[in-house]
Image (cartoon, grey):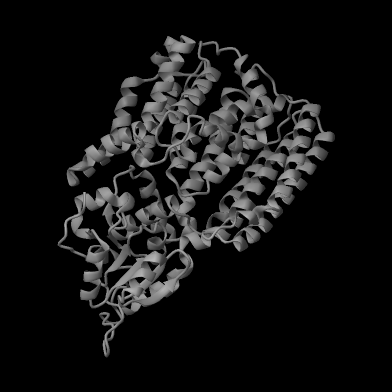
């Protein structure tokens, strides 16, 4: 597919410098923000618990069994904690690595399947699109899943190039099967169902039956199951309740029913993709039109048709789901970037000038709109936070505007399809997302609860290692990670309902049951929502505030007259080190409510 020459003379040194610059911008800010609830805190805490307990088979969250997702990312994050220590940038490292690797992979695939210019421009598009860039800096499962699904797609494209040796085809296809297995270990059956359905649909649409002869089905299936099977067997042996909950409840009911309470209209992902590829929106339709006219390869394989089926089917699959989140359609981003990257080198200087001018005006309008950000202030996120965040947004827009003007200047003095102009424009949006994303920590500090952690940990260090810590009527997704301690759930199990159902001795089914336990405990800590704290305080429940903010209050059981904490000496483990024991300290006699 190298029959369409690029008008761009490529310089390898310049490309290496672009990769190094991207790496600096991509990785350096990882620790500049606090973890956000719920996903970031949840997956960081699950990895912390796996690391400190040494149990790499049964995932747990806040001390309870948690089988909603497979463990690949939890394994990766736990290893990161083992190698680099426990912290915020460490919790995001795997996500950032998969996002960055996805950029390099789409560049390599574009260069090998089409031509060098396509690869470079596709990588630029993916790296600078807000959808991929921002999701690559949040500790969620969808970026890891998207990378392994991207590798599945790219390995298939690379394997189906004409005139390859049989051994080369086999190697790429084995990589395709292995990446599907890792996608399954990332988020479940979608890792194999979606690529399989796309291949079947592609075969019917393109009438390319010969592709099935080059899939290396037998060896690929052996490799796939060799990677996938061990964990599923081991976790089922240790947890007989696993298979029903994981496959029936989480894989099928989650998709087919509204039980997860994440509804959205059928067009839910349309604005997601519009905003996610905003810098390249003006050339998207032309990119698809140009790609559609590309001929098949000499062996009859049609890579563009496969990519279009990949984009269309996955988009429709998640649009039809009863459960929707912004990141669900992320796996189609690399294919979109490759189609746009195929077209960008062919832009004339005048076409690129119009593109850049339009976005320069857009940035000016966005800066004017940003002035009104404080109007969004609420009791939960006060106006002063929006005032502080407005400074970051305006700075991000200013940097983006200057770089867009630089792209216009470069375009005026260079030939058509200028790498310099496109790279400058891409950098504008990359830095816009990086600066505005970093500034979002004005909200993240409050939502994370991290500022409370030092006072809580100082108090925990004064108490016996087996002191219970209760979470009353609420599940805080970030505080357990920051204090290095799990909590006994009270009354409201939230998403830990399954874990509570199989280990009911680890929770208290009502606030009243907790009040009785609190009165009986010699030492105790508790996390409460402010309204609950105020109500119980009026009722005369003895509580001493350890730390509080507008969203949470952490209290301890007041010490009796003459009573002093009795930790077991200077060599005793800290409360964080004793986390597994403390997580199971409560043993209420009441049965959980159904």
Question: In this figure, what is the number of numbered marks?
Answer: 0
Is residue 266 among what the camera can see? yes
Quadrant of the rendering where the N terminus is positioned:
top right
Q: Residue furthest front?
A: 538
Q: Is residue 442 above or below residue 133?
A: below
* Identity of the residue drawn at 26% across and 66% down: 582
Give the left or right position of residue 422, taking residue 292 as reference.
right
Residue 366: which quarter of the image?
A: top right
Residue 164 location (% of width, % of height):
49, 18
Q: Is residue 505 above or below residue 252?
A: below
Residue 383 location (% of width, % of height):
61, 60
Viewer-side residue, 163 vs 468: 468
Viewer-side residue, 340 vs 177: 340
Residue 269 location (% of width, % of height):
52, 33
Q: Residue furthest left?
A: 589
* Identity of the residue drawn at 40% across and 75% down: 546
Viewer-side residue, 112 vs 539: 539
Is residue 58 among what the camera can see? no
Give the left or right position of residue 347, taking residue 564 as reference.
right
* Identity of the residue drawn at 57% across and 35% down: 271
Residue 198: which quarter of the image?
A: top left
Viewer-side residue, 410 vs 369: 369
Q: Residue furthest bottom?
A: 562
Residue 469 location (% of width, % of height):
30, 68
Give the left or right position of residue 210, taking residue 111 as reference.
left
Give the left or right position of residue 466, taking residue 194 as reference.
left
* Identity of the residue drawn at 44% across and 11% down: 204
């Amino acid at each position: 597919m190298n029959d369409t020459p690029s008008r761009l003379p490529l310089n390898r040194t310049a490309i290496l410098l672009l990769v190094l610059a991207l790496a600096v911008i991509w990785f350096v800010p990882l620790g500049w923000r606090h973890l956000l609830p719920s996903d970031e805190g949840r997956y960081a805490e699950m990895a912390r618990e796996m690391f400190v307990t040494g149990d790499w088979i049964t995932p747990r969250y806040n001390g309870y069994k948690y089988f909603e997702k497979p463990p690949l990312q939890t394994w990766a994050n736990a290893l990161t904690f083992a190698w680099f220590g426990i912290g915020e940038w460490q919790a995001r490292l795997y996500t950032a690595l998969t996002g960055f690797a996805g950029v390099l992979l789409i560049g390599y695939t574009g260069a090998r399947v089409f031509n060098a210019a396509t690869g470079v421009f596709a990588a630029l598009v993916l790296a600078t699109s807000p959808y991929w860039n921002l999701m690559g800096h949040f500790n969620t499962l969808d970026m890891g899943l998207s990378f392994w699904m991207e590798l599945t797609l790219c390995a298939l494209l690379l394997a189906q190039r004409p005139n390859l040796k049989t051994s080369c085809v086999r190697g790429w296809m084995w990589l395709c099967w292995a990446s599907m297995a890792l996608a399954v270990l990332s988020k479940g059956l979608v890792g194999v169902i979606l690529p399989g359905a796309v291949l079947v649909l592609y075969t019917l649409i393109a009438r390319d039956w010969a592709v099935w002869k080059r899939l290396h089905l037998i060896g690929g299936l052996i490799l796939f199951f060799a990677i996938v099977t061990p964990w599923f067997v081991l976790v089922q042996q240790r947890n007989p309740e696993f298979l029903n909950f994981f496959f029936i409840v989480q894989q099928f009911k989650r998709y087919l029913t509204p039980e997860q309470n994440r509804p959205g209209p059928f067009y839910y992902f349309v604005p997601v993709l519009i905003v996610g590829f905003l810098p390249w929106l003006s050339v998207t339709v032309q990119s698809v039109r140009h790609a559609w006219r590309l001929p098949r390869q000499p062996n009859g394989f049609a890579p563009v048709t496969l990519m279009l089926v990949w984009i269309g089917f996955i988009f429709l699959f998640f649009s039809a789901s009863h459960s929707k989140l912004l990141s669900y359609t992320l796996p189609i981003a690399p294919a979109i970037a490759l189609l746009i990257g195929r077209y960008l080198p062919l832009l004339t200087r005048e076409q690129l000038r119009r593109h850049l001018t339009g976005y320069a005006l857009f940035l000016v309008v966005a800066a004017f709109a940003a002035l009104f950000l404080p109007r969004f202030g609420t009791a939960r996120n006060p106006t002063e936070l929006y005032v502080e965040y407005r400074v970051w947004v305006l700075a991000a827009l200013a940097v983006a505007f200057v770089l867009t003007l630089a792209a216009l200047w470069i375009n005026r003095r260079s030939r058509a399809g200028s790498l310099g102009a496109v790279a400058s424009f891409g950098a504008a949006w990359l830095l816009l997302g990086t600066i505005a994303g970093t500034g979002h920590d004005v909200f993240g500090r409050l939502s994370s609860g991290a500022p409370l952690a030092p006072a809580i940990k100082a108090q925990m260090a004064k108490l016996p290692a087996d002191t219970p810590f209760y979470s009353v009527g609420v599940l805080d997704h970030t505080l357990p990670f920051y204090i290095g301690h799990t909590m006994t759930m009270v009354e409201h199990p939230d998403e830990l309902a399954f874990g509570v159902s199989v280990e009911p001795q680890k929770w208290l089914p009502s606030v009243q049951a907790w009040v009785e336990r609190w009165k009986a405990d010699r030492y105790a800590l508790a996390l409460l929502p402010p309204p609950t704290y105020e109500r119980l305080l009026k009722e005369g429940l003895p509580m001493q505030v350890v730390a509080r903010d507008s969203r949470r209050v952490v209290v301890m059981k007041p010490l009796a007259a003459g009573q002093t904490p009795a930790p077991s000496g200077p060599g005793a483990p800290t409360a964080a080190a004793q986390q597994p024991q403390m997580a199971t300290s409560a043993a209420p006699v009441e049965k959980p409510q159904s």
